Image (cartoon, coloured by chain):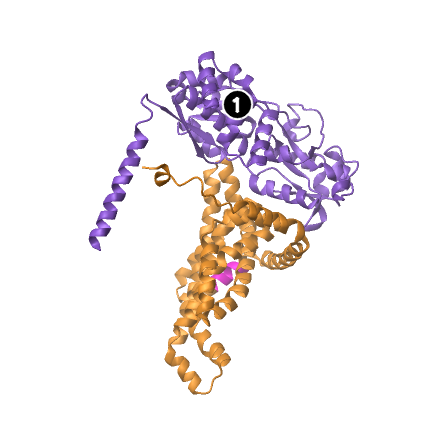
Chain colours: A purple, B orange
Amino acid sequence: MKNKTLLFIACLSIALLFSACGGTDSGDAKQIKAVFADAGWDSIRFHNAVASYIGGAAYNIAGEDIPGTTPITYNGLISGDVDVYMEVWVDNLPTYYDDVRAGKFRELGVNFDDNKQGLYVPRYVIEGDPERGIEPMAPDLRTVEDLKKYSHVFKDPDDNAKGRIYGAISGWEIDNVMRNKYKFYGLDENYNYFDPGSEAASVAAISAAYNKGEPIVAYHWDPTWLTGKLDLVLLEDAPYDPELYPLGQTECPSMNITICVSNEFYEKAPDFVEFLRKYRTSSALTAEALAYIEDNNASMEEAAKWFLKEHDELIDQWLPEDKAELVRNKLSQ
Amino acid sequence: MPDWLIDFPSGIKLNISDPIDRFIDYLITEWDAFFSSITNGLRVFLNSIGYVVERIPWWLLITIIFVLTWRMSKKIGRAILYSLLVFSIGAMGLWDLMNTTLAIIIASVIISIIIGFPTGVLVSSSDRLDSIVRPILDTMQTMPSFVYLIPAAMLLGLGNVPAVLATTIYAVPPLIRLTSHGIRQVDREVIEAATAFGSTKWQSLIKVKIPQAMPTIMTGVNQTIMMAISMVVTGSMIGVTGLGQEVLISINRLQAGRGFTAGIAIVIMAIVMDRLTQGIIKKGEAFIDE
């Protein structure tokens, strides 16, 4: 009995040894490891997957994601634990411009800058949805200011006298702006500003209300799979003005979403950095990919492949000819 | 060696996530009225506790803690220390946040006791029931809380009310376990003696078993309180207010000092509540020994 056990263990270790050997003979040329920041939302994961895929196909880069919150991954970028940050939401980071000036990391360029954020309501709240048997609940709701008339529609379950506005996520810069906006339009008189606590909870609240056909007004931003999938309307606001915006008196500007790399990585992989410099997408492109993921239950890597095949022209914009060739070869495999 | 011996065979697929998604969607759309009524009931309960807690003046709460600790431990030094610790929460400017958190903890613990204690008694009476309930409790305790926190938020909305429910799920298992365990551990001879004196099953349960098991049951209550406190921080992810939210905000802003301040306040709450319930347990034990 004991011998049999020993024999079994011996066999198992030999098998393990073989499989381990099988793993090591790839990667003859030295691969460069690149740690991508996964700050917790889908679009950054998607961009990570695209850059990682191209890095693997053309630049001998072995990409891996490191998860964390925005401040943690951002600090990682400064300390060098994070090599590549595909989506830095500049205005959400109070120290960003100082850090760039101080040379704590390298800003390579803009990933996309046509995003939106603000207060959203489902379209059926304004227009109704005959298909689902929903009557318009707030037919004249166009602007943030109009909300004042409709506090009885967006009732706060914890406080029957007032309405509830699902605010931005506590701790984000935009949260301060939204709180100012809430006061500026006098919404504090008949609304409570509700802190959802986390992105996941905010999304849960919006999609649950949407499924039930209930009214909800909530802070959100585009591009996300939620804005791609649900029919949400952004409430209008006064035109953007840099002075008045922080006081909450105007609409949110489109934010610069930049790509940054750590100083160390900047030196280590100049070719790949050159590619990241040219990397540029848009809100629409990103939302398209995120909706593909949501609809097909696709992995990020599958989505990256699908995206690069679908938008073949981007490969030429981003990459020199020889590298583009490599990526196309890998894609057609 | 064939591939399927090295890598897990890719042909074998088990998909339980789609049915679960459909089930949750079904609950959200079809059972809305049911969950709304649960939420409303819980809300009334939580608000009334909050109402009471908020109206206890700060000096009264500190005095209560002082007297309780003193009577429990007979040590005046300890009583002063705990009062000072609670006082320092107020001095750090966190008194109101502590009250909110306290209300959530008290509500969850009361609901946990209402559910957990009878269940524990029931489970102690049957081995078969025990073998059914045990894996369920294991699941409740080990399932990462975020997994059911988000569906709970979809069913019950965001805020303090669903958090009470999520906290209960997380905090009730030790109470059920220890109640059942405590009752099972009561000396057979004691029960036989009770039966010999003509006690019915019900009488021996109420008058003998449960009092004898009280220290173990109180340990369960103590565990439940501790788990409820730890859940308060996680709950802030679905919009729970109070100290947990303070911790979350400071993490999001990378303000270590502010985070530690709120964290220390939570630690103080936990220590004081732990020692007070431990004191009750010790008193109970002394009572039984007599």
Q: Residue furthest bottom?
A: B197
| Whether residue A104 can be seen here | no
| In-image side of A184 versus B255 (left or right) | right
Q: Residue furthest left?
A: A3
Q: Chain of mark 1?
A: A
Secondary structure, mark 1, is helix
Q: Quadrant of the C terminus of chain B?
A: bottom left
Amino acid on which disc 1 is placed: Leu
Q: Quadrant of residue A30?
A: top left
Residue count near mark 1 (Cα–Cα under 10 Å), binned few <14, some 14–19, many ≥20: some
Q: Is residue A259 above or below residue A300?
A: above
Q: Does the magenta run of residues contain B66?
A: yes
Say which residue appears at 37% left-offset and 80% top-offset. B189
Q: Main secondary structure of the magenta part?
A: helix
Q: Percent from the top left, x then y, of residue B230?
A: 47, 52
Please tell me which residue lies in front, B149 or B83. Answer: B149
Q: Quadrant of the N terminus of chain B?
A: top left
Q: How many marks?
A: 1
Q: Which residues make up the magenta segment?
A: B60-67
Q: Percent from the top left, x then y, of residue A112?
A: 57, 22
Q: Percent from the top left, x then y, of residue A106?
A: 45, 20
Q: Quadrant of residue A290?
A: top right
Q: Is residue B69 above or below residue A320?
A: below
| Whether residue B200 can be seen here | yes
Say which residue appears at 43% left-offset and 56% top-offset. B271
Q: Quadrant of residue A232?
A: top right
Please tell me which residue lies in front, B98 or B110. Answer: B110
Please tell me which residue lies in front, B169 or B19. Answer: B19
Q: Does the magenta run of residues contain A298?
A: no
Say which residue appears at 30% left-offset and 36% top-offset. A19
Q: Residue furthest top?
A: A321
The residue indicated by pointer 1 is A308
